[in-house]
Image (cartoon, rainbow, N blue to C red):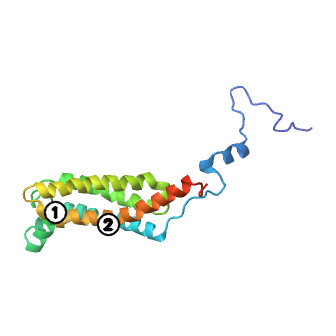
Amino acid sequence: MRLPSPRARRPRAGALAPNDLTRTLPAMSSISSRPHKRPLASPWLSLVIRLLGVSFVLFFGAAIVTILLGIDHRAAGDPIGLLVLRLVRWGSVHGGGEHYELMISTVYVVWGAFLWKAADAPFEHALFLDFTVVANVAHFGLMFVQGLTMPGEHLHLVGDVALGWLALALFAATWLPARGNTRKRHTAGVDR
């Protein structure tokens, strides 16, 4: 007895007919097996993105550990510890804003981890990297204004404000030209 070919069979009532994925999948560019011509990042760009990510994780991770272990309260009794706290802690050196510090530090630790991953293929994460520049310009810009105008907070201008601007300037000076060059080449049709 000869069975009918699978194409000749009709699906049961209510059953879905099988799809011909051999034609559907290649047409879907996001999962296509065709190689994409994506711009390659320079090793410097990937390195700088990773350095920014690591700096976020280390700086803000240290803040989390310091607060959770109460090291900040012990450091406030030492002149050098007090100076370090004044450079990075806004408001009272003896605390009061730890809840806020833990929240923003957690966000920045996660941000740093995502930057590390984005360094693998920066041009595929351009929006995230652009957001990193703009959000930190806003953040450090506000810190700069507050450092200038708030009584007792001027020391931050040579502490966390200066450190933040330095890290951001290095990242922006590497990322923005690379992104601009890629857009120009893409617009000209070189990467198509």
Residue drawn at (87%, 38%) of the image:
3
Query: Image check: 70 left or right of 110?
Result: left
Front label number (1 vs 2): 1
Estimate the x, y position of residue 76 in percent, counting from the top left. Answer: 9, 67
Quadrant location of the C terminus in the rendered image: bottom right
Query: Three-letter amino acid code at disc 1?
Result: His
Residue drawn at (45%, 54%) of the image:
126
Quadrant location of the N terminus in the rendered image: top right
User: How many marks are shown on the rendered structure?
Assistant: 2
For residue 57, say whether it is visible: no
Whether residue 30 is situated above or below residue 51 in the rendered picture: above
Mark 1 / mark 2, whichever is N-terminal: 2
Residue drawn at (11%, 68%) of the image:
74
Residue 156, numbered circle? 1
Query: Image check: 53 left or right of 125?
Result: left
- Residue located beneath label 2 in the image: 55
For residue 142, say whether it is visible: yes
Element class at badge 1: helix
Q: Which quadrant of the structure image shows residue 80? A: bottom left
